[in-house]
Amino acid sequence: MIGSVILKRRPAHFVVALSAVLTSVSAAGYKINPFKDRNTGGELTQRAGSADAVHEDITYAAIACADDHGGVAPIGPTPLCLHRSSHVAERPAGGPGNIGNAIIVGVWWNDDPHGFLYRNDVWNGVLSWLAAKSTASRVRKQGPQHRERATGRLLYRSHFHDLQFLHAMAAKDGEEASRTRQQIIDWIAFTYRVSTGEHGEGASLHGLGSPVRELFTPADPRLTVSYLFKRSRMRELATRELALGSLLHVVQDSFAASHAVRKFEASDACPSGRITQFYAYQGQREKAHGAQDTRKALNESLASRFTDLQNPVEASARMILFVRRKADWNQEVLPYVRETLLCLDGAAEISGSGKFGRAQRWGGED
């Protein structure tokens, strides 16, 4: 295969770095694989311990389901994606590659808000991403003064600090579930309005009514909606589709077992099931967390834990259909998000590390 030839010609440190970046974990949710179907339709990392392209596979399954339903997105209890949600298969190689698909690049954004991965030279992009994640991880382990100096970097903030809601997680232990949920809803609302064109790509982020504006310094006049989601080399990608990808990433991560606790039986407030706790990453063990972000863990959950209405393919397809027909946020989308997707009731606990904590023995030693 093409991938085998390329890897044989690369120095050993490239393969080591590649394996490290594809298996490294943080508060990053289901795994991504920026090499999968990137340009040629091939699998460049088959011989290098490749990561599962879970987000990509969920997204393609959801798009296929949405295509089956045209412009209709029912809010009722009838699932849309029965045949798509029982198993998420690895997408066959083929097509133009993910680097040309703005929705998939947007799905990467939550893991890569600086756009390192969107480069034709995929190796240099991944190595830059690896270096940034390594720096962020070191900063996390240093004193508060170092962490404060790193807060300008979105990658650090989204993986280890106050923007962990981008992965459907709390910023720290002891956070009220209602606060975490509201931050997630604020982000979904913002990206939804960008995806539908209500927020134009040239709009100043601080001129919008969204609470998201409070997350970014007002001193930067460049901070438009478009600038937030793409670097200059991404000018060919549609900002609206990048925002939709980011929205789907959050939705999908809310189903990852090391990110949130879901109960699928009905309660008075949540007839379709509910979230009883959002986890915070800081106290979790990396291997235990990461083991729940694989395709194997996803398909086990699809087979035994998720319901037809509550699973990441179904939820993603509904959001795609909402966007396609520009459903009213307050009348249609928000009720679905609050009452089904992210429903809370009185049983919700404050955030913690749960069974994935460092004092636990879950999934082996780090």
Image (spheres, grey):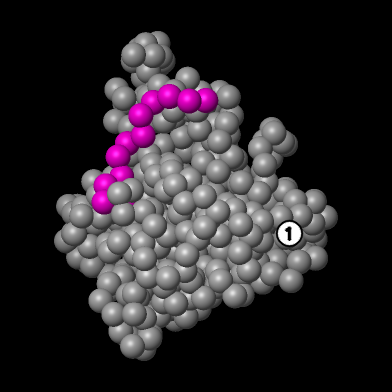
Count the marks. Answer: 1
- Left or right: 281, with 100 as reference point: left
**Figure quadrant of the N terminus:** top left
**Along the horizontal axis of the image, is 196 left or right of 275?**
right
Question: Which residue is at a point 27% across and 47% down the rendered structure image?
Answer: 87
Write down the quadrant of residue 225 in the picture.
bottom right
Q: Position of residue 226 (x, y in %)?
A: 72, 48
Residue drawn at 30 percent across, 49 percent down: 83
State the SS at label 1.
Answer: loop
Mark 1 = which residue?
199
x then y, percent, for residue 43:
37, 24
65 w.r.t. 163: above or below: above
In the image, residue 194 above or below residue 130:
below
The kind of residue on which mark 1 rests is: His
Residue 59 spot, x, y in % from top left = 44, 46
Q: Nearer the viewer, residue 104 or 328?
A: 328
Position of 196 relative to 277 (above/below): above
Q: Residue at x 47, y 38 (%)?
A: 130
How crowded pointer 1 is (Cα within 10 Å; few <14, some 14-19, many 20+) is rated as some
Which percent across, then down, holds residue 17? Answer: 40, 30
Left-right relation of 33 to 218: left
Is residue 87 highlighted in magenta? yes
Q: Is residue 66 left or right of residue 222?
A: left
**Picture layout, residue 143 above or below residue 98:** below
Residue placed farthest to the right in the image? 221
Give the dominant element type of the magenta stretch: helix, strand or loop.
Answer: loop
In this orientation, does residue 349 appear? no
Determine the residue positioned at 48% across, 25% down: 95
In the image, 216 versus 69, the foreground residue is 69
Magenta range is: 85-96
